[in-house]
Amino acid sequence: MSRVWSAALRGVDGVPVEVEVRISSQLPRIDIVGLPDPSVRESAARVRAAIAGVGRSLPNRRITVNLAPAGLRKAGAGLDLPIAVGILAADGAFEGRTLADLALVGELALDGRLRPVRGALALALAAREVGCTRLIVPAGNAMEAGLCPQLDVRGANDLESVLAHLLGAETLAVASSEPPSERGEEGLDLADVRGQQTGRRALEIAAAGGHALLMRGAPGSGKTMLARRLPALLPELDFEEALEVTRIHGAAGRIPAGASVLMRRPFRAPHHTASTAGLFGGGNPPAPGEVSLAHSGVLFLDELPEFDRRSLEALRQVLEERRVIVARARSSCEFPARFQLVTAANPCPCGWHASGARDCRCDDGALARYIGRVSGPLLDRIDLHVDLRPVAWQDLDSAAAGESSASVRARVNRARAVQARRSTLTGCRCNAELPDAVLDDTVRATSEARRLLGRAVESCGLSARAARRVLKVARTIADLAGEGSTSPHAVAEALGYRGESAANP
């Protein structure tokens, strides 16, 4: 009998799996037990061919492979390599102590080559949790798995090199654990945007405080152009955030070839025809959706009223809890979903209502139905509402470029640094996440500013949630201005982003 550690994916997390192999004197056959799905049951054929491909043969007896814990369903082909090594160890190919504190992950080709698997970083973290200090993965996963601290990761090209390493005939190369020192290519530059000073200012405030943003305007007014430049204004990912982003994208199989860690904030822009499962995650086995792929980055929903109403209503809970729970009859998966929401919408079905550029062709009924596609409770959770007007030709034709993303990001970083110093008291990374318990002490609004907000709540009918979000935006405006307390000017500007758009998508 032999035992070897491996891991399997469950959502975006790795789960340790102990592969137990027993060879008994019965009719030749391979049995795999422990709730394997079809891709795991088929590994018997791949393992048999791969072992033959490296010049070895299976014992002519009954082979029983148990995948523990037996109550967890295992999916994927990453268990091929540990099953093959476990069979050879049980047959006496090498001593059992060779496998102590070792984990193996990899899919086998019929000729013994190792193919990469999804979620190598998550699997490496799972192996470390059970005390493994060594890990062998396919060479294509070595860079990603090598990011796991306190784990000796080796990459192999085929089963033969793995066996040679275990027998001491040769040594597999150690995977590099050094993260890239560069952030990568800069994103789209805000200097490309001509005019739209209100939109640029709202984008800066959103970046500085992590606030959700809604832009409403006619076609061609620059909504998408502004949204795609938000990631370049956000602070760089720290290493812990980069590891988490890499883990999620690795579990979804979305890490580019040759990349080890994703150092840029994600920007996800799903089409409005995306299904609920595509947005929030699901499938069998459950996979992360767009809101999780946008974790630590930006989720952009263009043409907001065109999204399915049920999906938009589900988004409300995700914005509050910053996670998604995909529940199934036998199990459930939790996906992280801490993202910054940016949305865009036309003012009406034809797109030209109150634009001043063209006449609107929509009647009152069509306009009311279009506005009603986005519920008030969802709009209430969006901090910044901005109306964008078409840019005049003289501004578009101007040779003068606007302020660059680099200079705006410098101000955003200073404001975020202030919020980071407060995080020891608030426990929040940015102002948009401030809980009610610490809101008043953090905002420090002057008495005049509070009176101004009170008059606005009574005259405009703002909800309690909207009033609290106005205070959070005002605190961000004060941070950008370097003010210790929140002034009436900051509250007045924050109220300007909850105007008539608070009632319209």
Image: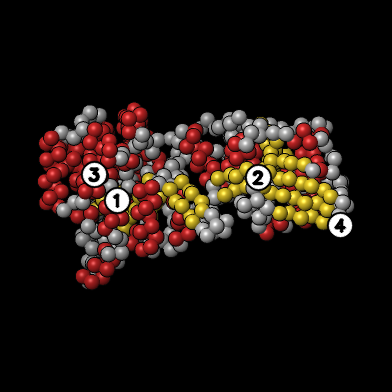
| Amino acid residing under circle 3 | Arg
The residue closer to the viewer here, 425 or 46, is 425
How far apart are labels 4 and 1 at the CA level?
Answer: 65 Å
Q: Residue 485: image x %, image y %? A: 20, 31
Report which residue position mark 1 lands on. 381
**Answer yes or no: do the residues labelled 3 and 2 have beta carbons within 8 Å?**
no
Looking at the rendered image, the quarter that the N terminus falls into is top right
Looking at the rendered image, the disc whose residue lies closer to the viewer, 3 or 2, is: 2
Task: Look at the image and tell me whether residue 224 can be seen.
Answer: no
**Which is nearer the N-term, disc 3 or disc 4?**
4
Report which residue position mark 2 lands on. 17
Q: Determine the image quadrant of residue 81.
A: top right
What's the residue at 51%, 58% (across, down)? 328
Looking at the rendered image, the disc whose residue lies closer to the viewer, 2 or 4, is: 4
How is this picture coloured? secondary structure
Label 4, residues with CA under 10 Å away: few <14, some 14-19, many ≥20: few
Numbered marks: total: 4
Report which residue position mark 3 lands on. 468
The residue closer to the viewer here, 431 or 497, is 431
From what the image shows, is residue 268 above or below residue 184?
Answer: below
Q: Residue 64: image x %, image y %? A: 77, 51
| Amino acid residing under circle 2 | Val
